[in-house]
Amino acid sequence: MSDFHNEILVNHSKLPWSYQPKCPPVGITSSSPLPPLFQELKIRNLTLKNRIVVSPMCQYSSTDGYLNDWHLVHLGQFAIGGASLVIQEATAVQAHGRISPFDAGLWKDDQMVMMKRIVDFIHSQHAAAGIQLGHAGRKASTKPPFDPTHREKAYFEREEGGWPDEVVAPSSLPWTEGWIIPKELSLDEIEQFKNDFICSTKRAIQCGFDFLEIHAAHGYLLAEFLSQTSNHRQDKYGDSFENRIRLLLELTERVRQVWPEEKPLSVRLSCDEWVGNDGWTIDDTLILTEKLLDLGVDIIDTSSGGNSSKQVIKVGLGYQVPFADAIKKKFGTKILAAPVGMIVDPKQADDIIEKGQGDLIVIAREFLRDSHFPLKAAKQLGVDISWAPQYQRAKQ
Ligand SMILES: Cc1cc2nc3c(=O)[nH]c(=O)nc-3n(C[C@H](O)[C@H](O)[C@H](O)COP(=O)(O)O)c2cc1C
């Protein structure tokens, strides 16, 4: 561990005050029946205090994969705001698997220091801490969406801090014209990817994360393997459906072996590629879900799209809820479904749980607009939840 990172730890532990509130933990004090959104959910040994989850959101604010104070404040605010689970942004298991040069990583031990500090803070607010591990595949080395030159050219050259010559994918197919032409992964490199994923999983355990999500959505490496639009391999990882899902299943099996049995495991899928039957569809997702369930996956985080530049997405309020609903209809209580995407209103979120269309509500942008969304939601739904004592005087 570097002196710099040791220093952070030492200074933090010497602080004269504690983050830990000196009064009873966050709890619900209403006597009337609770709206479903505020009912607890036990997944393995983890009890979530409500159903509101912060979706992983890249901040493009890391250096060499290291998180920093931005991430502490960014993620910490959601824990103060009453989310039951805060999932850290897509975190790369290999340096060249970062989406951009500014993404989070967990490919070396030093990177655990700040993560552990953030996990501890989230825990101090009686929330659970999750991490999403992944690899960007052919979408690696790209520019953050807020880079002003992003639309002219999507990726960074090596002299700009990128690694276009190291970008890999199942097949040598760019995401779209003008993007990096990736190198096809060799079988040895696929093994290395799995091994590195397991090393990152072990580090996530050491950081104290309660929840792990495998990122197999949005056209990143694992999603690229799933679809015939991005996977043209002819070996055991390509061609047939069984071959295309092989990598995700092999990886999941190994992750479940090392990720503690008492902790939940989630997989984020792009349930539909939005290109019709030429690509991955919800029917494929349902077949895959059954296999993931058999491997000990507890939750499917139901996202969509991102794998094909030809996608035509029907965006609207709760537009990805039907994917979670399809999973619930087919598997009932055997697996949990976590819809995400334009869920912006407490009543809308509560209705989804009430109707059994999902078990957890995953929210991204609404949390950026209002980091205390759950506190507001509780008020709107007539639930009296405890606030952080430091904020108590603002609670009416
Ligand atoms: C700033 C930002 C960063 C994101 N980064 C990630 C990410 O790291 N991993 C991921 O799976 N999805 C990521 N997403 C997608 C969100 O997690 C979410 O699925 C999507 O925004 C739809 O939910 P929403 O309508 O509540 O924003 C990101 C979205 C935003 C707005």
Image (cartoon, helix red, strand yellow):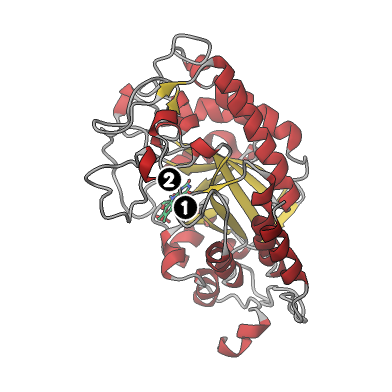
Q: Residue at x 76, y 67 (%)?
A: 10
Q: Amino acid at mark 2?
A: Ser
For label 2, the crowd category at 10 Å Cα-Cα, with few meaning under 14, some 14 to 19 and many 20 or more, is: many
At horizontal 35% and vertical 55% (from top left) the residue drawn is 317
- Residue type at mark 1 is Cys
Query: Which of marks 1 and 2 precedes in the sequence?
Result: 1
Give how far apart the Cα atoms at labels 2 and 1 are: 9 Å
**Residue 380 visible in the snapshot:** yes
Residue at which label 1 appears: 58
Instruction: Look at the numbered discs 2 and 1 and tell me whether their residues touch, using CB distance below 8 Å.
Output: yes
Quarter of the picture holding the C terminus: bottom right
Q: Which residue is mark 2?
A: 100
Residue 221 versus residue 153 in the image, above or below: above
Residue 21 image-quadrant placement: bottom right
Q: Which quadrant of the figure has residue 9? A: bottom right
Q: Nearer the viewer, residue 60 or 363?
A: 60
| Circle 2 or circle 1, nearest the eye | 2
Q: Is mark 1 within 8 Å of ligand 1?
A: yes
Image spot of residue 119 (x, y percent)? 68, 59
The x, y position of residue 99, in whole percent, is: 44, 42
In this image, 68 relative to 147: left or right? right
Q: Residue furthest top?
A: 234
